[in-house]
Image (cartoon, helix red, strand yellow):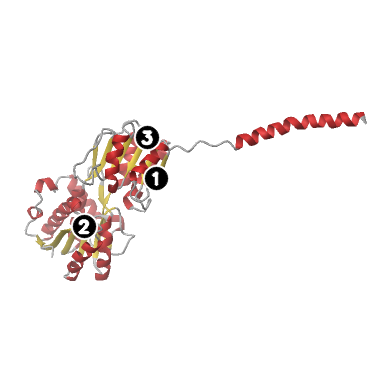
C-alpha cells in the first residue's frame, strides 16, 4: 500500500510542471499582437481601386515596393474625407503617402504641413485649395505631372492619319492642354494628307458634367462628327452613351479605355504605373525628390497611345513607331498653352477648320 501511495505521488509531481508549462504557453498565445505597420501608403478614391489612375498608381507601387522589400497598404476614404484616411495611414506607420486622385488636392495641402517629417507624392496634380487655383508644393512633397500636349498630339495625329475628317474635342477647362496638343496633331496629319478636317472644340466646366456634356456632344454626332476626343474620366463616361447611340467613335484619355466600350478606338495614355514605380525606387535609394515637380513626357516615355489595343483601321503600330521617331528627331514642334495665349486657332493652318461649339 505504501508503495502504491509513493507511486501516485511521484506521478503527480511529474504532471505538475507539465501543467505549468502548458498554462504558460496558453498565456503567451493570448497576448495581443502589435498592429501591422506599413511604410508606404496609397490613398484611393472613395470607390477604392476602381478608378483607372488610382489602380495604375497602385500597380506601380506594388511593382517597385516588392522589388525593394518595402511594406505598403492602401486606404479608402469614407466619402471625400481624404485627410482622415491620410491620418489613418500615418497611425499605421506610413513614411511616404501617395495620393493619385486630383480630388485630394486640398487634403494634401493640409497634410504636407501637418506632417513635415513625412513624404507625399501627388500624381497628375499639384496640391491646391478648392477656393484657389494657386498650388503649393511643400518641401516634403513631390508631384508627378504629364505632358498632356504631347499625349494630345499623338491622339490627334493618329485620328487624322486614320482618315477621320469630322472630329470633336471636349474636356473640363483644366484639361485644355490635351486639346491644344490634339489640334496640333490633327493639323500635322491633315497637312500631310492634303485634306481638310473639321473639328468642334468645347469645355464642360460644370460637375457633375454628364448632362452638360450630353447636351453638347449629341448635336455634334447628329451633325456628322465621327470621333470625339473625350478628356477625363467623367467626360468619357458622359460622352459614351451619345457615341454608342450614334455608332460613332471616342478617343479616351489618361488610361487605356478599350474595355469600357467598343466605341473607344484609342486612348491617349499617361504611363502612371511606370512613373510611380520610378519615384518609389528613388525613395528606396533615399533619393526621393522632395520639393520637386517631375515631368513625364515623350522623352521620359511618360505618355503614349494604346496602340496595342487600338481599333483604328489604317493607323498601324508601324505608323505609330514612325511618328515617335519623327518626334524624337524634332520634325514637329508641340506648343503648350502658354505659348499660344489661349488661342487654339493660332495653331491651325488651312487644313483644319475650327467650327463653333453649338
Secondary structure under tag 3 reads loop
Image coordinates of residue 38 in percent, x first then y, are 43, 38
Q: Which residue is at the front of the view, 306 or 59?
A: 59
Residue 27 tag number = none
Q: Which residue is mark 2?
A: 206
Q: Earlier in the sequence, mark 1 or mark 3?
A: 1
Secondary structure under tag 1 reads strand
Q: Which residue is at the front of the view, 199 or 137?
A: 137
Q: Residues within 10 Å of mark 2 (few under 14, many from 20)?
A: few
**Callout 1–callout 3 Cβ contact below 8 Å:** no
- Classify 172 as above or below 137: below
Q: Residues within 10 Å of mark 1 (few under 14, many from 20)?
A: some
Q: Report the side of 27 relative to 211 (left or right).
A: right
Q: Which residue is mark 3?
A: 95
Q: Earlier in the sequence, mark 1 or mark 2?
A: 1
Q: Does residue 153 appear anywhere in the picture?
A: no
Q: Which residue is mark 1?
A: 75
Q: Examine the image and state in which quarter residue 179 appears.
A: bottom left
Secondary structure under tag 2 reads loop
Q: Examine the image and state in which quarter residue 256 appears.
A: bottom left
Q: Does residue 103 appear anywhere in the picture?
A: yes
Mark 1 → mark 2, Cα distance in angstroms = 29 Å
At a point 27% along the width and 44% down the height, the residue shown is 105
**Callout 1–callout 2 Cβ contact below 8 Å:** no
Amino acid at each position: 500500500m505504501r508503495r502504491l501511495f509513493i507511486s501516485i505521488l511521484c506521478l503527480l509531481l511529474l504532471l505538475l510542471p507539465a501543467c505549468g508549462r502548458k498554462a504558460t504557453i496558453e498565456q503567451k498565445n493570448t497576448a495581443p499582437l502589435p498592429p501591422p505597420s506599413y511604410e508606404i501608403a496609397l490613398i484611393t478614391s472613395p470607390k477604392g481601386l476602381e478608378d483607372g489612375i488610382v489602380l495604375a498608381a497602385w500597380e506601380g507601387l506594388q511593382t517597385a515596393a516588392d522589388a525593394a522589400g518595402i511594406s505598403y497598404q492602401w486606404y479608402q476614404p469614407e466619402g471625400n474625407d481624404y485627410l482622415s484616411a491620410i491620418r489613418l495611414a500615418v497611425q499605421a506607420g506610413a513614411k511616404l503617402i501617395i495620393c493619385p486622385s486630383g480630388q485630394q488636392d486640398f487634403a494634401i495641402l493640409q497634410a504636407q504641413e501637418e506632417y513635415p517629417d513625412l513624404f507625399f507624392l501627388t500624381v497628375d496634380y499639384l496640391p491646391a485649395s478648392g477656393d484657389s487655383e494657386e498650388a503649393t508644393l511643400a518641401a516634403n512633397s513631390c508631384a508627378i505631372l504629364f505632358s498632356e500636349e504631347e499625349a494630345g498630339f499623338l491622339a490627334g495625329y493618329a485620328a487624322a492619319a486614320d482618315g477621320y475628317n469630322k472630329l470633336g474635342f471636349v474636356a473640363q477647362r483644366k484639361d485644355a492642354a490635351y486639346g491644344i496638343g490634339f489640334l496640333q496633331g490633327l493639323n500635322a496629319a491633315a497637312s500631310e494628307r492634303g485634306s481638310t478636317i473639321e473639328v468642334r472644340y468645347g469645355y464642360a466646366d460644370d460637375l457633375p458634367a454628364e448632362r452638360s456634356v450630353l447636351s453638347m456632344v449629341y448635336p455634334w454626332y447628329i451633325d456628322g462628327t465621327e470621333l470625339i476626343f473625350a478628356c477625363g474620366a467623367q467626360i468619357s463616361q458622359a460622352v459614351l452613351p451619345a457615341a454608342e447611340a450614334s455608332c460613332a467613335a471616342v478617343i479616351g484619355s489618361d488610361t487605356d479605355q478599350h474595355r469600357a466600350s467598343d466605341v473607344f478606338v484609342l486612348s491617349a495614355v499617361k504611363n502612371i504605373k511606370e512613373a510611380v514605380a520610378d519615384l518609389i525606387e528613388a525613395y528606396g535609394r533615399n533619393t526621393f525628390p522632395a520639393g520637386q515637380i517631375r515631368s513625364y513626357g515623350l522623352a521620359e516615355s511618360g505618355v503614349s497611345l494604346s496602340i496595342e489595343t487600338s481599333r483604328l483601321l489604317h493607323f498601324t503600330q508601324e505608323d505609330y513607331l514612325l511618328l515617335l521617331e519623327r518626334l524624337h528627331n524634332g520634325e514637329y514642334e508641340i506648343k503648350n498653352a502658354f505659348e499660344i495665349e489661349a488661342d487654339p486657332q493660332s495653331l491651325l493652318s488651312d487644313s483644319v477648320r475650327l467650327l463653333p461649339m453649338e
